[in-house]
Image: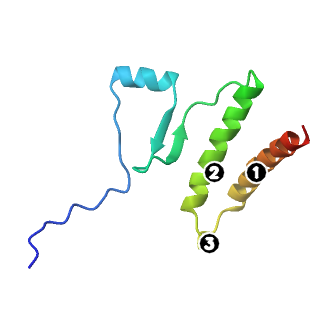
């Protein structure tokens, strides 16, 4: 007979409350959420103004990471609405265009 107690079920959502100092820091920076193995799961930040090519490349990288996380969550049984498909296609086209420009340099 097993006398161990099962842990409570994991909640479907988690609320993290920040104190004023943490919130001030959050507004001026970005938040990365990593898995226990260190894999970046998502990045939360305000869009950076694209002042330089480096800024634009960083934004594109952040969007690509977020897309990767979303694609990991979607399987073939999920039917995406047409608007989601159009938006994903637009972002992938932007990434593809950037990669083509890089290859032609």
Residue located 11% across and 75% down the image: 2
- Whichever of labels 3 and 1 marks the residue nearer the N terminus, that label is 3
Residue located 12% across and 68% down the image: 4
Could you say which disc has been placed on residue 48 in the image? none
Q: Are marks 1 and 2 in contact (CB under 8 Å)?
A: yes
SS category of the residue bearing label 3:
loop
Viewer-closest of 40 and 46: 40
Viewer-closest of 18 and 69: 69
Left or right: 64 as drawn, with respect to 34: right
Q: CA distance from mark 3 to mark 1?
A: 19 Å
Percent position of residue 94, x then y: 79, 45
Q: CA distance from mark 1 to mark 2?
A: 9 Å
Q: How is the image coloured?
A: rainbow
- Whichever of labels 1 and 2 marks the residue nearer the N terminus, that label is 2
Task: State which quarter of the image contains the N terminus.
Answer: bottom left
Please name the residue that numbered disc 1 is placed on: 92
Please name the residue that numbered disc 3 is placed on: 76
């Amino acid at each position: 007979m097993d006398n161990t107690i099962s842990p409570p079920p994991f909640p479907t959502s988690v609320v993290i409350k920040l104190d004023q100092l943490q919130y001030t820091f959050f507004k001026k920076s970005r938040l990365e959420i990593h898995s226990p193995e260190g894999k970046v799961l998502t990045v939360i930040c305000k869009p950076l103004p694209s002042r330089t090519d480096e800024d634009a490349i960083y934004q594109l990288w952040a969007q690509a990471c977020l897309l990767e996380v979303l694609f990991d969550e979607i399987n073939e049984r999920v039917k995406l609405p047409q608007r989601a498909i159009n938006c994903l296609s637009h972002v992938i086209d932007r990434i593809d265009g950037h990669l083509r420009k890089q290859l032609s340099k």
